Amino acid sequence: MRKVNRILDPEILTVGFARRFATYKRGTLLFSDKERLKRLVNDTTRPVQFIFAGKAHPRDEAGKTIIQEVYKFSHEAGLENRIVFLEDYDSYIARRLVQGVDLWLNHPLRPLEASGTSGMKAAPNGGINLSVLDGWWREGYNGSNGWAIGAEINNGTTEFQNEVDASSLYQLLENQIVPLYYAKPDGKLPLAWLQLMRESIRSVTPAFNTQRMVKEYTEQLYIPAAESYENFSRDGCGAAMHLSQWKTQIRKDWPAIKISDVQIRNKDRQSILVGESLQIAARVHLGAVDPQHVRVEAYHGEADNGDIRNPASTVLNQTGRADGDGNYIYQGAVPACASCRRILVSCRCMNCV
């Protein structure tokens, strides 16, 4: 801690990164281009300092390796006075970091971030978020209360995605964040930065708090769970036994289900314009499964190297039975775009579990 106190400067832009060190959190992303990082942190007029802290799960060897790498980087020549790793991370350190940093950094690999609560805690304390649009920041970012790393698309392999996001991170720091922090038109205060702080506090604090968490858990989970328990317990647990039997039968019959044929029934299928509809008919083999227990959909969107970007789905309606061997015809109209089909389980009693 004596070394930390000697190195850290309260007048320098301070960036915090503290969390559980799992591989998808990409704890070493900042060090992707160390020479570029050295130029950034050692700028004579606009320096930057980074504080890292965190722990890995006791059985997460990959996470432990990331911590070792960050610690090693923090002692390299050119970084040793601008990168600090705080050991023995606990709630005491966590509270002081979210209270003390200017900028809170988070760059998980999309779409693996479930939440990212540390950024929610930094905002009410005046910390501004710099994060990938994933987890809570996907909802919290409004374009004027922080910064978003990269775009909401996945760029092929993990390695290439890391390169793209690291480049975006460096560009944001160099071209927007650092200049804004050190811009003091009156010679005293970074007025634009303070405005961003106020917008971050205003937009994040009322929307991301314990009151909302308890309310939504109660309304969306606890009350429905209590109602489900009551429904399944009624009449000697009849509904529960029915659901169990239904699931067992579906698991047995599901492997035989298949989409055996799909037809586009537009007269001129080669020149369907955007905004028009594809008239789709699908022959579906359900075997022993009752049609009321499935939902057939057309899954469609913009084609993107074998994937579908911005996907949507359209329910196809059963319009007839092809024969007596468990084959059915489903039809519907979907927007003219790249598409595929899918079948989903559908049971009224599933709404209560």
Image (cartoon, rainbow, N blue to C red):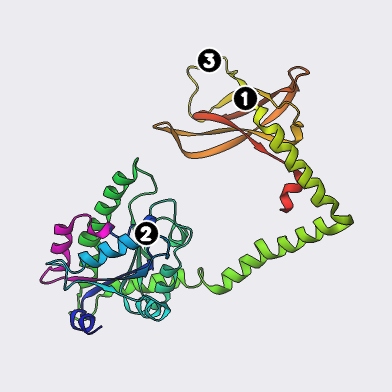
Q: On the picture, is 172 further left or further right than 58?
A: left
The dot on residue 61 is: 2
What residue is disc 3 on? Answer: 268
Taking 161 as reference, is 285 above or below it?
A: above
Q: Earlier in the sequence, mark 3 or mark 2?
A: 2
Q: Are marks 3 and 1 in contact (CB under 8 Å)?
A: no
Disc 2/disc 1 C-alpha distance (Å): 44 Å
> Where on the picture, by quarter, is residue 58?
bottom left
Taking the spot 44% from the left edge, 51% from the top edge, the residue there is: 111
Mark 3 and mark 2 in contact? Answer it, CB < 8 Å. no
Indicate the quadrant where residue 6 lies.
bottom left
Tell me the amino acid under the disc marked 2. Glu
Q: Secondary structure at mark 3?
A: loop
- Judge whether residue 108 can be spotted in this image: no
The boundaries of the magenta stretch are 29-50
Viewed as shown, does residue 4 lie left or right of 338? Answer: left
Mark 3 burial class by Cα count in 10 Å: few <14, some 14-19, many 20+: few
- What kind of element bears circle 2? helix
Q: CA distance from mark 3 to mark 1?
A: 24 Å
Q: How dense is the environment of label 2, judged by Cα within 10 Å: few (below 14), some, or many (20 and up)?
A: few
Residue 282 seen in the figure: yes
Look at mark 1 in the image and give the residue it sits on.
259
Query: Which percent across, then down, holds residue 186?
Result: 20, 79
- For badge 1, the amino acid type reads Ile
Q: Residue furthest right?
A: 235
Q: CA distance from mark 3 to mark 2?
A: 58 Å
Q: Point out residue 2 in the picture as x, y percentages from the top left corner.
A: 22, 85
Q: Earlier in the sequence, mark 2 or mark 1?
A: 2
- In the image, what residue occupies the spot 37% across and 56% down? 23
Which label lies toward us, 2 or 1? 2
For badge 3, the amino acid type reads Asp
